[in-house]
C-alpha cells in the first residue's frame, strides 16, 4: 500500500490511477491522516454487447399477424 499526500495526489493523479489499475492500493492523506483510497476495480461481469451475434436468427415473418386462434388465446377470447 502506498500513501501519498493530497497535494502530491493532485499533481500526480494520472500516474496514481495507472498504479491503482495495475493492482496497487493508494491511500491519500491530508495533514497525515488517511482520507481516501484509490483501489483497482475488478473486471466487469456483465454481458458484452454483441456477445450473441450470429447465434440468434430472426425469421422473415417475425412481425406477421398472428393466426386467429393464437390471437384469441392471447386476448382471452373464446374459440
Image: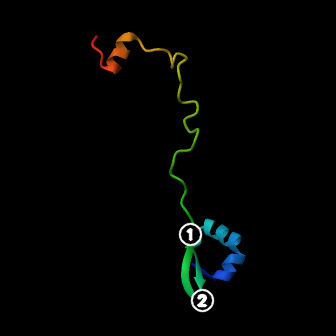
Q: Position of residue 37 (x, y in %)?
A: 56, 74
Q: Residue at point 56% right, 69% down? A: 39
**Residue 31 horizontal side relative to residue 75, left or right:** right
| Disc 1: CA contacts within 10 A as few (<14), some (14-19) or many (>=20) | some
**Residue 15 horizontal side relative to residue 52, left or right:** right
| Residue 29: assigned label | none
User: On the image, numbered disc 1 is attached to which residue?
Assistant: 39
The quarter of the displayed image where residue 72 is located: top left
Q: Position of residue 69 (x, y in %)?
A: 35, 11
Q: Residue at point 46% right, 14% down? A: 65
In terms of secondary structure, where does tag 2 sit? loop
Q: Residue at point 55% right, 56% down? A: 43
The N terminus: image quadrant: bottom right
Q: Position of residue 63 (x, y in %)?
A: 51, 19
Q: Nearer the viewer, mark 2 or mark 1?
A: 2
| Nearer the observer, 21 or 67 | 67
The quarter of the displayed image where residue 4 is located: bottom right
In terms of secondary structure, where does tag 1 sit? loop
User: On the image, numbered disc 2 is attached to which residue?
Assistant: 31
**Residue 5 horizontal side relative to residue 64, left or right:** right
The earlier-in-sequence mark between 2 and 1 is 2
The C terminus: image quadrant: top left
Distance (Cα) linking label 2 and label 1 = 21 Å
| Disc 2: CA contacts within 10 A as few (<14), some (14-19) or many (>=20) | few
| Nearer the observer, 68 or 39 | 68
Q: Position of residue 24 (x, y in %)?
A: 59, 72
The quarter of the displayed image where residue 50 is located: top right
| Nearer the observer, 70 or 54 | 70
Residue lying at the far bottom of the rendered structure: 31
Amino acid at each position: 500500500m502506498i500513501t501519498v499526500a493530497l497535494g502530491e495526489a493532485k499533481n500526480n493523479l494520472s500516474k496514481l490511477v495507472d498504479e491503482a489499475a495495475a493492482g496497487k492500493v493508494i491511500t491519500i492523506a491530508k495533514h497525515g491522516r488517511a482520507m481516501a483510497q484509490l483501489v483497482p476495480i475488478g473486471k466487469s461481469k456483465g454481458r458484452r454487447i454483441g456477445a450473441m451475434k450470429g447465434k440468434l436468427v430472426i425469421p422473415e415473418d417475425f412481425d406477421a399477424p398472428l393466426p386467429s386462434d393464437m390471437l384469441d388465446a392471447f386476448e382471452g377470447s373464446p374459440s
